[in-house]
Image: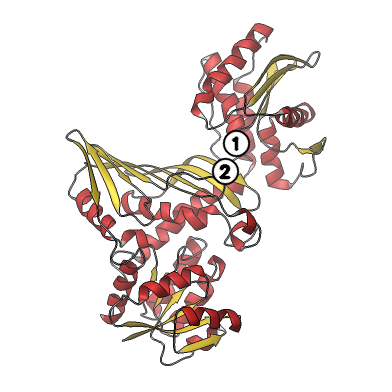
Amino acid sequence: MLRWGILGAGKIAGRFADSLKHVPDSMLYAISGRNMEKLEAFAEKHPCEKIYVGHENMLDDPDLDVIYLALPHALHKEWALKALEKGIPVLCEKPASLNAEEMREIAECAKQHNTLFMEAMKLRFVPAYRKLKEMLEEGVIGDIEDVSASMCFPFPKEAFGMTYHTQAGKGSGALLDGGIYCAGIVEDWLKGTPVPCMTYANYYGFDLYSEAYLKFDNGTARIESGFDRALPKDAVIKGTKGIVTVHDFHRPTRFVICTDEGETEYEFPYEHDDFYSEIAHFASLVQQGKTESDIMTYASMIREAEILDTIASQFTCYDEADCQVLEAQEKEFAVEQFTSQDALALGNTIVSLLKDYDRGVAVRIDRCADDVAVFQYVSDDKKDANLRYADGKKACVRDTGHSSAWVYVKNRMDGSYEDWKKDGVHVVSGGAFPLYGKEGILAVIQVSGLHEGKDHELIVRALAKQQKKAYTHFIKAIG
């Protein structure tokens, strides 16, 4: 009989304890935490033999066989290492680590102590995914070329800022919390080192939302995660002969395969619940004396973390080369002249491209010679506030000679413009662009209403389309 201990007494620990009841030769033996009242309330719902105030005390119990680590993300490495050093196998809730460096340290410790460690990436263990993997490996959709996965949900407003998820600091943000599932399925099918192609994000000391495009040796990936919107939690795997859509891919029971022969839906219910399969697999490994999972290998866990590291680096890590890319855009779109007819054509081009985005905008083009608005458009879902934001962004351009995206990047690098405001509006973000002529800036193009740097992107795309030019992409997150 495996005697399990659970570090942490939160909601997910309770779901784990419920599922553990179904696993043969396993029992909930102990629970540990910081608050006796909370632990007693947990034990009333999930009976166990021992309650420990202090995780170290539980790890010192000689009768403990194995642990489930259900603490906040930032504590995973610390307590995984402590357990492994005592020879206690660890099933760790995702994400197993905050980054690839931590994951390598955990893997090395597990190997040194000949003790099993596994991330609880439940999607890989449920019957539906196991069957899907079997079918994909048999070539049902040919060679895989692209994987797209989305994990977005509205974080409860009443809890916003109250837990580590939405507080600036280690372990916070939607990418670690939900994006890890996306990395889990991408890592399973795309090989080689991830290379960033384009990143969008809302970053406020933590990532509220991100959408990243990556390139791998054998294909491309899109990873989306967020706390600010409700979207289908689906993964789409594209191959040379067809497409698979996995619904609720973080704990799937069904998927749809579409090929030239038609569309077929497959459904495979859980074994008891979505936790059971991963727990049963881990318990079996411990009972067999295994020190590594063949489904969730150390290499897989490290690559997952590397994928998330690649994306996260695009949120905040900027250098002079990034400023140079934005400056190159300004030079690429310089013109001999810019008339009112040119402004009308450009504004209409911006509006025509809105179909590619998920919300409306306010657009204004101001002629610099006399500060007259020569084009203005406001979508039905926008308000006067968006024009005030545009004013602030325009001030960035007029005062620096660069796009407000450039100002944002400079601020991230050295804090140069941290206190810039106009009428109470923060202006350090993308969305205003200088159109240069021979004698200086001819016009300032302003777009307000999109997020994640897409204001800036929309302007640049419109200029490129109007001028029939290629342009230098800026691939990191802006704003």
Query: Residue 266: x, y in percent?
Result: 23, 49
Task: Give the secondary structure at mark 1.
Answer: loop
Q: Position of residue 221 (x, y in %)?
A: 40, 43
State the separation of the CA atoms marked 2 and 1.
7 Å
**Residue 390, relative to residue 169: is it above or below?**
above
The answer to the question of whether label 2 and label 1 lie on touching residues, with beta carbons closer than 8 A, is: yes
Please say whether residue 91 is visible from this viewpoint: no
Three-letter amino acid code at disc 2? Ala
Q: Quadrant of residue 181?
A: bottom left
Viewed as shown, does residue 290 lie left or right of 172? left
318 with respect to 268 (left or right):
right
55, 289: nearer the viewer: 55
Q: Position of residue 110 (x, y in %)?
A: 40, 76
Q: Nearer the viewer, residue 466 or 276?
A: 276
Where does residue 227 sit, x and y in percent of width and height?
Answer: 55, 50
Tag 2 secondary structure: strand
Sooner in the amino-acid sequence: mark 2 or mark 1: 2
Q: Amino acid at mark 1?
A: Gly
Residue identifier under label 2: 201
Disc number placed over residue 453 in the picture, else none:
1
Q: Residue furthest bottom?
A: 62
Residue beneath the point at 28% across and 48% down: 255
Seen from the viewer's position, the closer of residues 204 and 471 is 204
Q: Quadrant of the C terminus?
A: top right
Crowd rating for badge 2 (residues with CA inside 10 Å; few <14, some 14–19, many 20+): many
Q: Residue at the spot x=78%, y=29% of the render?
A: 395
Q: Is residue 56 above or below residue 150?
A: below
Q: Tell me the crowding category of disc 1: few under 14, some 14 to 19, or many 20 or more residues within 10 angstroms, Cα based.
A: many
Camera-side residue of 50 and 340: 50
Residue at image location 52% in from the left, 75% down from the top: 9
